[in-house]
Amino acid sequence: MAESTQKTDYVVGVDLGGTKILTGIFTQQLEVIGRTKISTKPERGTKAVIERIARCVQEAVDECELSFKQIRGIGIGAPGTVDAGTGQVLFAPNLGWQNVELKKELEAQLGLPVFAENDGNLSTLGVYHAELESKPRHMLGIFLGTGIGGGIIIDGKLYKGFNKSAGELGHMVIDVGGPKCACGNRGCFESLAGRQSLFLKIQTMVKEGHKTVLTEMLGPELNNMRSGDLRKAIRKGDDLVEQVVIQAAEYTGIAIANLMNILSPEVIVLGGGIIDALADEMMPIIVNTARDYAMLGTDKGVSLFASKLGDDAGITGAAVIARRETQ
Ligand SMILES: [Zn+2]
């Protein structure tokens, strides 16, 4: 093998989501050279999910014609509270996980150093490093996926807070007594605008007799509904789906107004599967609502836009910490 290909010049970024596991292989310059995606299948249990993560990493390394000797380390984002020091996932409601030794288990399976963090924090870092050339001092990332994750950057650094759990923007209560959230609370932002909550709302309305084109597209049970199906339905003129999506966009705007009032960020970036699929439909409503509800003056000069990184935000942020920790 040529000398140049034997250098340990690569890092791996993994985005562990409630629906899918995405792995990217990155150069030290944070360019992605290959990606692998498999479904998470959290219902099969913790051990099975960790084995699936390991398999996803192995496949990505193999697809890029690399060997494990050429990989310096692996960064992974998990959807919940993560102790970045120990690499333990303390609580991940959308996976049904509590106190899972993610770092230890993955290191045992893969034989490489692993660094774990909250997925919203990593997606925010990914956007900050790969997309925001101006490097604003204060920035927020908000990601509408299966649930809703986020991250707070203050003075150019990820803000972790006293219990290292800061940035759980999805569990800000914005409708007291509202729908049940995966975290056990009611009326969290995630229970009003996360993908699971939108799907559940649509399924409930269909059971109550409301009509939607989605039943023609997916069958009466609306199995395997995806964010892109909501976009297709709206573009076919579906009122039910449009109303549900408008409402989610309004809640997102309200959440952002609260965050602007409290933190006064310079840049707010939105991402995640829901935004990737529905940016055209949702962003104008999100921006208008956020500016409507923000205190006078707090939104002045603030940039609020959808990330162009799509699925790459999480894996890029994961690669950022893998590179940082192995330098
Ligand atoms: Zn919650």
Image (cartoon, rainbow, N blue to C red):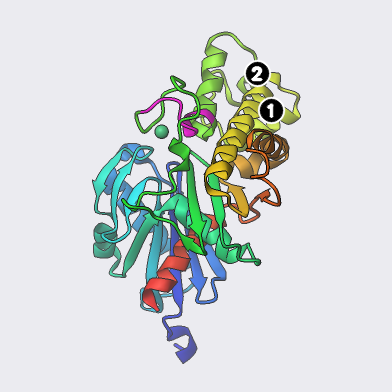
Q: CA distance from mark 1 to mark 2?
A: 8 Å
Query: What's the residue type where badge 2 is placed?
Result: Thr
Q: Residues within 10 Å of mark 2 (few under 14, many from 20)?
A: some
**Label 2 CB, ligand 1: below 8 Å?**
no
Q: Is residue 171 left or right of residue 204?
A: left
Residue 205 image point, x, y percent: 56, 15
Q: Is residue 213 visible?
A: yes
Q: Nearer the viewer, residue 241 or 23?
A: 241
The image quadrant where one finds the N terminus is bottom left
Query: What's the residue type where badge 1 is placed?
Result: Ala
Q: Earlier in the sequence, mark 1 or mark 2?
A: 2
Q: Is residue 221 visible?
A: no
Tag 2 secondary structure: loop
- Whether 7 is drawn above or below 59: the answer is below
The residue at 62%/54% (across/down) is: 267
Q: Main secondary structure of the magenta part?
A: loop
- In the rendering, which numbered label is found on residue 212? 2
The residue at 61%/56% (across/down) is: 309
Residue 14 image point, x, y percent: 43, 58
- In the rendering, which numbered label is found on residue 156? none
Q: Is residue 69 left or right of residue 263?
A: left
Q: Is residue 39 left or right of residue 44?
A: right
Residue furthest front in the image:
296
Q: Marks 1 and 2: CB-CB under 8 Å?
A: yes
Quadrant for ligand 1?
A: top left
The residue at 54%/45% (across/down) is: 143
Q: Nearer the viewer, residue 175 or 209?
A: 175
Highlighted magenta segment, given as a residue range: 185-192
The image quadrant where one finds the C terminus is bottom left
Quarter of the image where one finds residue 131: bottom right
- In the rendering, which numbered label is found on residue 233? 1
Quarter of the image where one finds residue 287: top right
